[in-house]
Image (cartoon, grey):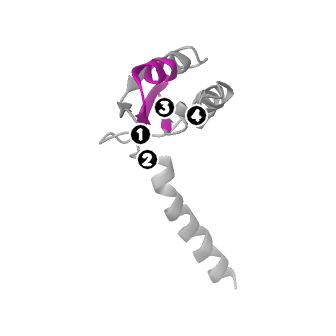
């Protein structure tokens, strides 16, 4: 029974490795800062702008926020970048958001 539990813990840890060393924002690999990511996502949601629904947020351990995804106009892109820059703990913002007009 102990071996089965240990095997489950090892498997769960291995399954979580891609989450800790994610590659969502391009070809870079980093340990994510989920606290800053959560702060930025919360502020984006608080804007109540459906145009920001497809913006993905990741933060590396150095406090650099990586924005990606799509928005329908440059105003939405600018708002997302401004929100990220104005969030506590953010050192820089890498904006990879793509504007795709509807």
> Is 96 situated above or below 2?
above
Q: Which residue is mark 4?
A: 50
Which of labels 3 and 2 is toward the front? 2
Q: Earlier in the sequence, mark 1 or mark 3?
A: 1
> Is 85 situated above or below 45?
above
| Element on which disc 4 rests | helix
Gap between marks 4 and 1, in whole Å? 29 Å
Q: Earlier in the sequence, mark 3 or mark 2?
A: 2
Discs 4, 2 touching: Cβ within 8 Å: no
Q: Is residue 71 left or right of residue 49?
A: left
Q: Which mark is residue 22?
A: 2
Discs 4, 1 touching: Cβ within 8 Å: no
Q: Is residue 73 magenta?
A: yes
Residue located farthest toward the left when viewing the structure as drawn: 27
Q: Earlier in the sequence, mark 4 or mark 2?
A: 2
Q: Which mark is residue 30?
A: 1
**Crowd band around label 1 with a 10 angstrom C-alpha radius: few (<14), some (14–19), many (20+):** some
> Is 18 situated above or below 47?
below
- Image coordinates of residue 6 in percent, x first then y, are 62, 74
Residue sitting at x 48%, y 23%: 76
Which of labels 2 and 1 is toward the front? 2
Along the line of sight, the residue nearer the viewer: 81 or 70:
70
Discs 2, 1 touching: Cβ within 8 Å: yes
Q: Which residue is mark 3?
A: 61
Along the line of sight, the residue nearer the viewer: 74 or 82:
74
| Element on which disc 3 rests | loop
**Crowd band around label 2 with a 10 angstrom C-alpha radius: few (<14), some (14–19), many (20+):** some
Residue sitting at x 50%, y 23%: 80
């Amino acid at each position: 029974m102990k071996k089965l539990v240990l095997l489950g813990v090892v498997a769960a840890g291995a399954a979580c490795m891609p989450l800790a060393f994610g590659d969502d924002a391009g070809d870079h690999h980093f340990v994510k800062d989920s606290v800053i990511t959560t702060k930025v996502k919360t502020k984006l949601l608080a804007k109540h702008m459906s145009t920001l629904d497809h913006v993905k947020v990741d933060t590396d351990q150095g406090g650099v926020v990586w924005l990606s995804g799509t928005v329908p106009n440059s105003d939405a892109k600018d708002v997302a970048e401004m929100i990220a820059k104005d969030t506590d703990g953010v050192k820089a913002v890498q904006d990879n958001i793509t504007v795709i007009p509807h």
